[in-house]
Image (cartoon, rainbow, N blue to C red):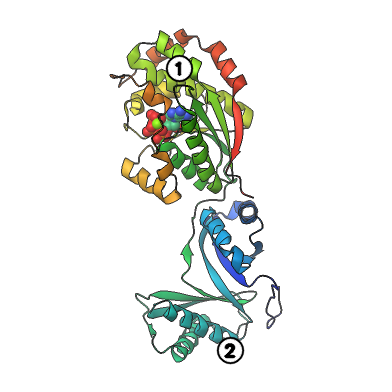
Amino acid sequence: MNGNNTVREFPHSPLTYLLKPGELILKKGNREAFERALKRNLVRLLGDSGRAETSPGRYYVHCGAETAPAVEDALNHLIGISGWARTRICPKTAGAVMAACAAEGRELFERGIRTFKIEARRTDKSFPLDSYRICAEGGNAVLAETPGLAVDVKNPGAVIEVEIRENAYVYSLAKRGRRGLPVGTSGRGLLLLSGGIDSPVAGYMMAFRGMGIDAVYFHAYPYTSEDARRKVVRLAEIVGRYAMGIRLYTAGFTCIQQRIRERAPLPWTTVLLRMAMMEYAERLAGKTGARCLVTGESLSQVASQTIENIHCIQGRTRLPVLRPLIGMDKEEIVKTASAIGTYETSILPYQDCCVLFSPPHPVLRGDPGEARKLYEALDLGALMEEALKEGTMEKCGFPF
Ligand code: ATP
Ligand code: MG
């Protein structure tokens, strides 16, 4: 804590960002653990680009101008904050705060903004002006400095925010944070990650709820190319940046796919392949410590995703299978994929194994009992062991 009139000096850190933590504010019981996770994630995402500092209710990042783009990129990837802004820091005197408001207003005008309002929050009640007066006097200071600006409390072009805490902070044009819960506060899940549009979004959505993510990709070389695998690695890197890194396991499924083609009735191949994926994933989860499986399934989007077939597929695992996209339509999923930056990679043309093996007339309403019998007849035990033994792992998107 600083004394009332001292400015905190950061000799090589001319820029400061203020961060508002998100939902964790509400979670009273877990608050400390959440704050610790958020701080840890922030520090890891920043790497050498900036220095993080915490104070009750706020986080700050100090950096030099040259690393500001890297800091902003980190803040754009940080799950668990409701907003952030570059801020001015000034001593807690009325004069200094008014001067900062005036300077902020001038900068807004130079950026083409013509109307504003001031919002003030006074955590330090020893500050001589209350919130109402900070707004009134701050507004006057802005108007005196920049007569071209006008106050508009209903629909302002920008809000100048003043916070009186351990220092005074003045900022505007705060960016919306990514929200969600800090990654690492909701256990671990194993994502079944294909090269498609859906599963990367599913992984992101669970990371958004605080879950750490491992991923498994089922590769069927040479039916699926090395390019297809690289695409999945790229997707894991993109999602990994939000999820604080993803361990991506690649499982060679060629022999298992061939066995299915040889022994199963053609209409059942897709459902049986999904069942094999579930079995593999459950066994892998046992090793990685994941407590659930995550898929990109969306109800009735394709034949294998009818509720009956989902029932058949679910039968291969006792772990909870989380399907965050189950109630979403494709348009919403595509929107999220675009927003998180996976869409462009997902639509690259490399075929995924399931497309290659998809039968012309798949079962639409598989019976779970029949599915189990057909699956057991495949006698995958030895092939499964072999695939588990041969699997590889690489780290994708780990920050720093
Ligand atoms: P996606 O866009 O995620 O590929 P999809 O709409 O193509 O999904 P399916 O191909 O039926 O749907 O796959 C359903 C889910 O099964 C996927 O979202 C993913 O979680 C998992 N999955 C499918 N293929 C693979 C694979 N080759 N490796 C890992 N997981 C897979
Ligand atoms: Mg797919």
Q: Are marks 2 and 1 in contact (CB under 8 Å)?
A: no
User: Tag 2's secondary structure?
Assistant: helix
The answer to whether residue 337 of the structure is visible from this angle is yes
Considering only vertical position in the picture, is 210 above or below 311?
below
- Residue 82 rendering spot, x and y as whole percentages: 50, 60
Residue at 65% x, 62% y is: 52
Q: Is residue 316 visible?
A: no
Which of the 4 image quarters holds residue 395? top right
Tell me where residue 13 sits by quadrant. Answer: bottom right
Residue 104, relative to residue 174: is it above or below?
A: below
Q: Is residue 333 left or right of residue 394?
A: left
Depth check: give the residue in front, 308 or 116. 116
User: Which residue carries the number 1 mark?
Assistant: 257
Task: Sort mark 1 into few (<14), some (14-19) or many (20+) by Cα contacts within 10 Å.
Answer: many
Mark 1 lies on a secondary structure that is helix
Kind of residue indicated by mark 1:
Gln
Residue 95: give its label: 2
